[in-house]
């Protein structure tokens, strides 16, 4: 699988700004202006929620943003998404908050990169009950992985399959959302983030959004599933996804396959065996005969790789079974609709 992301790992910028991600404060960022924006767009930096963690947003700009209902970094990112990532409109917001004109483009670019490529970790989950109503999710591991692996195109039905938005022939929920201005995926994310009015997200914030989804027309049985799916995608960055490379000839070895090949080649070289003559089972069985501690340690590393390979195979089989269960569930739902 290939992870599609253009978000850089800013090792140099983090080296310049030595505070750990959790300890970076607005004050320390201001003292480290050359790398503050790089810190904000680095995956290891956890948002504090303070608007001034965004470089070039100072006390005066914060006050003006507050007057527009934007109190936290999460709400600022949500506003950008509600604007459908329109940078011109977002620049107008920054201008209205009296941010430095020379740096507005950089702020807009950093906000865009954070939501699209770096990700936003919510860090909390819905409580088990909201206003006395039990909540439960239909988002299993297989569905969550499927959504993470989708290349989003800003169409709710395409981006969130199997969570209650329907498909091209079932647009009831999507139409209800559109009637409230939520016409696409960006705006749905924006609506959620705008509920985070405290420096760190809380279960209560999610509960309010859960109730808001009901007001917007989402069925009670799907609201929790929708929220969990959104959190899963926000965690990795909206524009990030993983895909299996298409077969256009011999399939390139995966990382696990390369590790297995290295183990086999090392075993063959050690025992002067013909290249390609050894199986993974032979390597595993041969470990018991190793006598020196040095070689035993070396061999066990490869044994661990082999064990991990078997574990991945078991997980893949479990995922296949989960997908079959999902198909059965969808078939049952279709029959019920008939």
Image: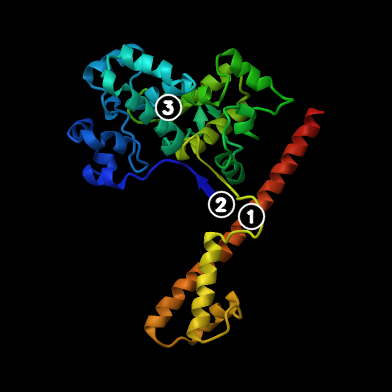
Query: What residue is at 28 percent from the left and 40 percent from the top?
Result: 22
Task: Please indicate whether residue 279 sits to the left or right of residue 30 in the image.
Answer: right
Q: Position of residue 241 (x, y in %)?
A: 53, 42
Does residue 252 sit above or below 148 in this rendering?
below
Nearest the eye: 294 or 225: 294
Question: Considering only vertical position in the picture, is 281 above or below 243?
Answer: below
The residue located at (78%, 28%) in the rendering is 337
Asked if residue 188 lies left or right of residue 170, the reply is left
Instruction: Determine whether 267 is above or below 44 in the image.
Output: below
- Secondary structure under the numbered disc 1 in the rendered image: helix
Q: Secondary structure at mark 3?
A: helix
Q: Which residue is mark 2?
A: 1
Mark 3: few/some/many CA within 10 Å (<14, 14-19, 20+): some
Q: Is residue 235 left or right of residue 17?
A: right
Badge number at residue 318: 1
Of labels 1 and 3, earlier in sequence is 3
Residue 278 at x, y percent in the picture: 59, 79
Q: Residues within 10 Å of mark 1 (few under 14, many from 20)?
A: few
What x and y, as percent, mark residue 297? 40, 77
- Which residue has dot 3 on it? 204
Q: Earlier in the sequence, mark 1 or mark 2?
A: 2
Task: Give the CA distance from mark 1 to mark 3.
Answer: 34 Å
Label 2 environment density (alpha carbons within 10 Å; few <14, some 14–19, many ≥20): few
Furthest residue in direction front, as rendered: 249
User: Which residue is the extreme one toward the left?
Assistant: 31
């Amino acid at each position: 699988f290939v992870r599609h992301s253009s978000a850089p790992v800013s090792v140099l910028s983090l080296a310049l700004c030595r505070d750990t991600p959790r300890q970076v404060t607005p004050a320390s960022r201001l003292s480290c202006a050359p790398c503050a924006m790089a810190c904000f767009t680095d995956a290891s930096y956890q948002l504090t929620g303070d608007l001034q963690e965004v470089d070039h947003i100072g006390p005066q700009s914060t006050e003006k943003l507050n007057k527009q209902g934007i109190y936290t970094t999460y709400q600022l990112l949500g506003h950008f998404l509600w604007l459908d990532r329109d940078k011109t409109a977002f620049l107008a917001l920054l201008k209205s908050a009296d941010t430095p004109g020379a740096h507005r483009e950089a702020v807009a670019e950093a906000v865009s990169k954070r939501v699209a490529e770096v990700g936003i970790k919510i860090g909390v989950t819905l409580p088990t009950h909201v206003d006395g109503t039990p909540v439960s999710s239909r988002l299993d591991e297989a569905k969550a992985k499927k959504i993470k692996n989708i290349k989003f195109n800003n169409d709710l039905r395409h981006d969130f399959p199997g969570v209650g938005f329907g498909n091209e022939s079932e647009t009831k929920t999507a139409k209800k959302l559109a009637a409230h201005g939520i016409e696409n995926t960006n705006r749905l994310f924006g609506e959620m983030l705008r509920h985070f009015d405290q420096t760190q997200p809380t279960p209560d914030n999610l509960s309010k959004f859960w109730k808001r989804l009901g007001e917007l027309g989402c069925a009670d049985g799907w609201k929790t599933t929708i929220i969990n799916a959104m959190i899963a995608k926000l965690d990795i960055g909206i524009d990030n996804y993983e895909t299996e490379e298409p077969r256009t000839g011999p399939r390139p070895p995966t990382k696990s396959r390369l590790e297995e090949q290295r183990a086999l080649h090392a075993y063959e070289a050690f025992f002067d065996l013909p290249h390609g003559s050894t199986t993974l089972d032979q390597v595993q069985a041969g470990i018991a005969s190793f006598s020196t501690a040095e070689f035993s340690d070396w061999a066990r590393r490869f044994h661990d790789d082999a064990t991990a390979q078997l574990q991945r195979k078991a997980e893949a089989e479990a995922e296949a079974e989960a997908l079959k269960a999902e198909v059965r569930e969808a078939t049952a739902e279709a029959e019920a609709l008939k």
